[in-house]
Image (cartoon, rainbow, N blue to C red):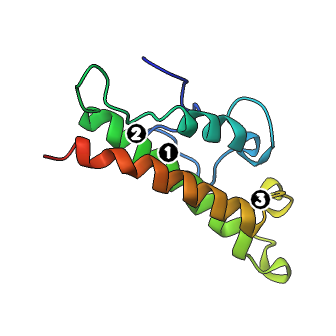
Amino acid sequence: MIGRPAPKWAEWTYKNEHLPATFHKMKGKGSIIQLLSWLKGQPLTPIHGQPASYGQVEKALLTVSLALCNMHIVTFMDPDNSGHLPIHIQASPFEIKDYEALGMECKMLLTYVPYVIH
């Protein structure tokens, strides 16, 4: 592996409906900060003239999709109708600005996709 590691939950084998409580923290392994750090490391950057593999692209898209889905739930949930959600989702500190910031990181990530798809 080259670069920073992706969060451990960023796998097709992740079986829970929502990301773990660690994602909803502002620091530590599995947190949004680890995800943003991984994205800032540009995991799809061509290396030695070779584009990222399809596996790398798949992992990157899975990772940001899971994160965006969870952040969407948090930022757009109705507090009066959130009793069915896990406590860590209900108490998540994320705001719309965090959702938008992740969206901007995704935009930067996708600037490398044309190098992969021929």
Q: Amino acid at mark 3?
A: Ile
Q: Amino acid at mark 1?
A: Thr
Q: Estimate the x, y position of residue 26 in percent, counting from the top left.
A: 81, 43
Q: Are marks 1 and 2 in contact (CB under 8 Å)?
A: yes
Q: Is residue 57 left or right of residue 70?
A: left
Number of the front mark, 3 or 2: 2
Can you tell which mark lies on residue 59?
A: 2
Q: Is residue 27 left or right of residue 118?
A: right
Number of the front mark, 1 or 3: 1
Residue drawn at 27 percent across, 19 percent down:
48
The residue indicated by pointer 1 is 63
The residue indicated by pointer 3 is 89
- Among the 4 quarters of the image, the one containing residue 85: bottom right
Label 3 residue SS: helix
Label 2 CA crowd tier, 10 Å (few <14, some 14–19, many 20+): some
1 lies above or below 106: above
